[in-house]
């Protein structure tokens, strides 16, 4: 396979460098305490130069969230069950509060249908809901999840619980979000069928 060369390849490489730096800086300092000027300086660009690679500040932060999602998929690739993956990500997110702050703030802002990243969140939630609902059906077929649970409803509740617990974690939640998330999963689970 031929590798890309020239300005396009350099642009892609610079964009990836920006996203890596943004993930690190935002995880460490948080969304509100990270300026585009600081991100630009971290990769040797002006603020205008930084935004050139993304088109707008909103698209930059959307790209950061997409990069975070991809990093989580790579980091937890051994977790083939979407419910287990979501539980693992909730646990991991306790170590990156700045990215949790970015996600919760940015997702609230993008609730406005005119926001540049509104469609990203619509698509993201639909995709996650579909994969979680399928995981619920798989667990129900295996007899390890309560058969009374409607898969689409449970998928929606799991996303709401995940997001809500992570928001609450920013307000001195006394119990770890992952422990509370897993508590609900335990309540929905049934003993495995005897073979």
Image (cartoon, rainbow, N blue to C red):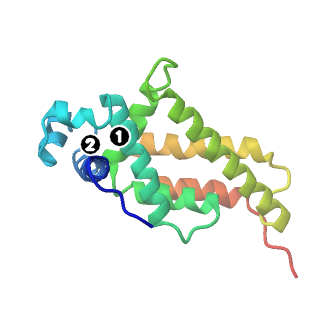
Where is residue 109 drawn, in percent x and y? Answer: 42, 25
Per the model, the C-alpha gap separating discs 1 and 2 is 6 Å
Q: Residue at x 26, y 46 (%)?
A: 26
Q: Which residue is mark 1?
A: 101
Q: Residue at x 16, y 48 (%)?
A: 43
User: How many numbered tags mark residues here?
Assistant: 2
Quarter containing the C terminus: bottom right
* Residue 71 position (above or below residue 29): below
- Is residue 174 visible to the viewer in this orientation of the structure? no
Where is residue 177 drawn, in percent x and y? Answer: 48, 52
Q: Nearer the viewer, residue 11 or 61?
A: 11
Question: In the figure, is residue 4 to the left or right of 126?
Answer: left
Tell me which corner region of the image, top left, top right, bottom left or bottom right, holds residue 78: bottom right
Q: Residue at x 22, y 49 (%)?
A: 25
Secondary structure, mark 2, is: loop
Mark 1 packing: few (<14 Cα in 10 Å), some, or many (20+)? Answer: many
Question: In the figure, is residue 101 to the left or right of 39?
Answer: right
Where is residue 135 drawn, in percent x and y? Answer: 72, 57
Q: What is the number of the mark on residue 162?
A: none
Where is residue 17 drawn, in percent x and y? Answer: 25, 53
Q: Residue at x 81, y 57 (%)?
A: 146
Q: Nearer the viewer, residue 173 or 71?
A: 71
Question: In the figure, is residue 47 to the left or right of 72?
Answer: left
Q: Which residue is mark 2?
A: 30
CB under 8 Å between callouts 1 and 2? yes
* Residue 76 position (above or below residue 115): below
* Residue 107 position (above or below residue 153): above
């Amino acid at each position: 396979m031929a590798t890309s060369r020239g300005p396009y390849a350099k642009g892609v490489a610079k964009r990836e460098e920006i996203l890596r730096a943004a993930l690190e800086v935002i995880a460490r300092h948080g969304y509100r305490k990270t300026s585009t000027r600081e991100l630009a300086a971290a990769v040797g660009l002006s603020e205008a130069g930084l935004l050139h690679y993304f088109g707008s500040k909103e698209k930059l932060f959307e790209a950061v969230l997409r990069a975070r999602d991809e990093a989580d998929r790579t980091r937890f690739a051994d977790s083939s069950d979407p419910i287990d993956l979501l539980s693992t990500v909730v646990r991991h997110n306790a170590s990156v509060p700045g990215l949790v702050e970015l996600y919760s703030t940015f997702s609230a802002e993008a609730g406005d249908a005119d926001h540049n990243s509104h469609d990203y969140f619509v698509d993201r939630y639909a995709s996650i809901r579909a994969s979680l609902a399928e995981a619920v059906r798989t667990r129900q077929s295996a007899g390890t999840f309560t058969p009374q649970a409607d898969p689409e409803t449970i998928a929606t509740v799991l996303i709401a619980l995940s997001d809500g617990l992570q928001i609450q974690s920013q307000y001195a939640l006394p119990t770890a979000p992952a422990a509370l998330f897993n508590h609900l999963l335990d309540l929905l689970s049934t003993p495995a069928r005897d073979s």
